[in-house]
Amino acid sequence: QGQGILRSGSVPPSPPAAFAMTAPGGGDGGGGTAASSSSPASPLACASSSSSPSSASPLPAWLTSPPGRPAVLAALGANCAVFALWQLARRGSAPAWLPRALGEHAMCSHANVRRGRVHTLLTSTFSHHAAGHFAVNTYGLAVFGNVAAEVLSARELGVLLVYGGGAASLCHIVCHPRNPVLGASGMLMGLVAANGLIDPQHRFTMILPVPGLTFSMLQAICHCTIILQVADLCFVANFAGFFILRRWLGPVAWAAHVGGTAAGLGFACGNWLSGDRRFASPW
């Protein structure tokens, strides 16, 4: 995850060749800012289902289109709600039970899981008490969630988020049983890994700090410009962080990032192996 501001978009499709949280008080591995834009239909996008004109939804179109958007909005809403509770808990006028409840139900730790609070494997991934941590992860979920939402249904995207978040928390508490964890970055890493096989040609253009630097989701699609692959960069950065950088960047939950990445990749590969050709080949 590099620090910067990104603008996202898509390019006309070509045959895809694919291949590929932090502890309290700590920062994430970085973040990006992007603005999503609609793109021309691609074979991947065409594979997603859309409602027919005769079955009009009572909900506004922006809530249901693209098909996976309800899952993205639910994740963003949960992030905002729990962040607001953490801010309330820091105020002197907050109820005495609130900080304790957040510690028991919005943070994941080996101790919490042993006491039967297995739900914290998931609830902790929507939990942020630092504003910067919250902003980076929430923005990342919005950007990369909307890429996946173009192809996946709300149910499928919800399953991906649950897999990524749960695996991230579990991986962290196995590797660091004494350190609690919270934050959506592990879930976000799972989303990035899956997006590499959902829409490998999706492009991002950096605005800051290197204007014009181009990234693709996974596949290099142009030979006349420098294109860096987002999924590959995250994969390499997280494994380097887990094995090398954690001695200098200890507050970053590298194990959670690796767990989320593995879950997202497993989700995409599993669907491809089952014959779902909305996902590109992992080979």
Image (cartoon, rainbow, N blue to C red):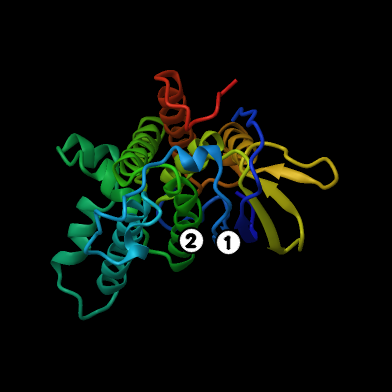
Q: Position of residue 13 (x, y in %)?
A: 64, 41
Q: Is residue 220 visible?
A: yes
Please name whichever residue, 25 or 78, is drawn nearer the observer in this view of the structure: 78
Query: Which residue is outermost to the right?
Result: 224
State the mark number for residue 34. Answer: 1
Q: Position of residue 228 (x, y in %)?
A: 72, 43
Please name whichever residue, 125 or 54, is drawn nearer the observer in this view of the structure: 54
The residue sitting at 36% across, 34% down in the picture is: 167
Query: Which residue is outermost to the bottom?
Result: 93
Quarter of the view holding residue 280: top right
Q: Is the Cβ of the residue at disc 1 closer than 8 Å to that at disc 2?
A: yes
Q: Residues within 10 Å of mark 2 (few under 14, many from 20)?
A: some
Q: Position of residue 240 (x, y in %)?
A: 62, 35
Disc with the residue nearer the chain's start (1 vs 2) = 1
Q: Secondary structure at mark 2?
A: helix
Judge whether 67 appears above or below 77 on screen. above
Q: Secondary structure at mark 1?
A: loop
Under mark 1, the amino acid is Ala
Q: Is residue 32 left or right of residue 50?
A: right
Judge whether 220 appears above or below 62 on screen. above
In 3D space, how far apart are the residues under numbered discs 1 and 2 (Cα atoms)? 8 Å
Q: Is residue 22 visible?
A: no
Q: Residues within 10 Å of mark 1 (few under 14, many from 20)?
A: many
Quadrant of the frame with the C terminus: top right
Q: Is residue 25 left or right of residue 95?
A: right
Q: Position of residue 18 (x, y in %)?
A: 61, 29
State the mark number for residue 227. Answer: none
Under mark 2, the amino acid is Tyr
Q: Determine which residue is flagged by label 2.
A: 139
The residue sitting at 61% across, 27% down in the picture is: 19
